[in-house]
Image (cartoon, helix red, strand yellow):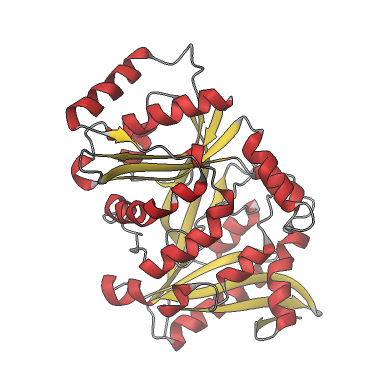
Amino acid sequence: MIEVLEVNNRKDFDEFFSFPHKLYKDCKQWVPPIISEEKNIFNPKKNSVFDHALARLFLAKKNGEVVGRIAAMINWIEIEEQNKSKVRFGWYDTIDDISVSEMLIKAVEGVAIAEDMKFIEGPMGFSNMDKAGLLVDGYEHMNTMITWYHYPYQKEHLEKLGLVKKSEWIEFKIYIFSKEEAPEKVKKISNLIKKRYNLRTLKFNSTKDILPHIDSMFNLLNQTYNKLETFVPIQKEQIEHYKKKYISYIHHDFVKCIVDDSNEMIGFVITMPSFTKALKKINGKMFPFGYFHLINAQRNNNKAAFYLIGVKENYQNKGVAGVIFQEIQEMFNRRGITEVETNPELEENKAIHGMWKNYRHELHKRRRTYTKKVKH
């Protein structure tokens, strides 16, 4: 017999986050998240998103054993400012039994009914800074630090249960030119754009040097993506949360900021060394050797990941992205990085896709959110 229970005690809370380690333990492509970081996402004392959001966690159990999990979330800013009567769901993992998925989705629908919401959508987190999208293509590839992995049957379950595609994200592998192969015209154009708009690149000697510029980066992020259908503006208190969450992963070499002649930031990019293999070794636990593996990944790595990029609205489509990429290209060459993986990009976000046109690239993964109207 299968039953779905709401998480309301420490034991169930721990099981919610340990379940994927059992479900995917034999999956070579699954990269486990850091369990403590996952728990902090749902800790109101650690995550300020709860100032304007709620979350309810559910476990599916069969004969007392956990066989599935799901989180239901409401972001009140999305509802009040964007008029989207939506319950988000995420952290959706299940054994290959459609009846388990059905009961988990019903639990989310129950939250929507209780809060008088019209539809559900997921998998996704509280905001655009969280993981989003069910993997629907590219199961042979490992997930990154900022994405989920799913088995193919999870897509089949949701579609059989009447959920339909809402949004789709695509991910690319980008192959970096060597210093000798890099097109000279790209460098020339970058220098031309810099001179035309009196731009310069900020120099960072440590990660600490980056912190005073984080707020400006997030302001640009809101400008860059505010016209996309799924975007929810990132609140100031959330910025503090993400600073704390990701600061240990950031190396100053991998962050580039472009400013104008009045020192106003007009573009930035945050990349990171690929932590995929390191996280696989850590297996969810930072102690005793987690930090060692992360530091080793920062220092010795031929792969990297694009995390965030933003360009001031009145500088978009003026070549600023090319300036940013030239800076990154030179850093990658110095560090021996030959391959970069992008974060998930909305399929309709052609402006971002166009950034890779000067590089050999491969679309290798797709992920999707699903939606369903709720019957009251």
* Left or right of residue 10: residue 303: left
- From the top left corner, tell me how far across and down residue 244 is, in percent: 53, 61
> Residue at the spot x=44%, y=76% of the render?
74
Instruction: List x then y, in percent, for residue 317.
Output: 23, 36
Residue 65 appears in which quarter of the rendering?
Answer: bottom right
Residue at 36%, 67% in the rendered image = 236
Residue 252 visible from this viewpoint: yes
The quadrant of the picture occupied by the C terminus is: bottom left
Instruction: Pick the residue in front: 292 or 340.
Output: 292
Q: Which residue appears at 47% of the width and 12% of the height?
A: 181
Foreground pick, 56 / 210: 210
Query: In the figure, residue 43 lies in which quadrant?
Result: bottom right
21 left or right of 218 in image: right
Please tell me which residue lies in front, 328 or 339.
Answer: 328
Q: In this view, does 140 lie to the left or right of 243?
A: right
Q: In this view, does 255 lie above or below 24?
A: above
Name the residue at 29% across, 49% down.
Answer: 224
Residue at the outermost bottom position: 114
Please provide percent x and percent y for residue 191: 28, 22
Q: From where the camera sits, is residue 29 visible?
A: no
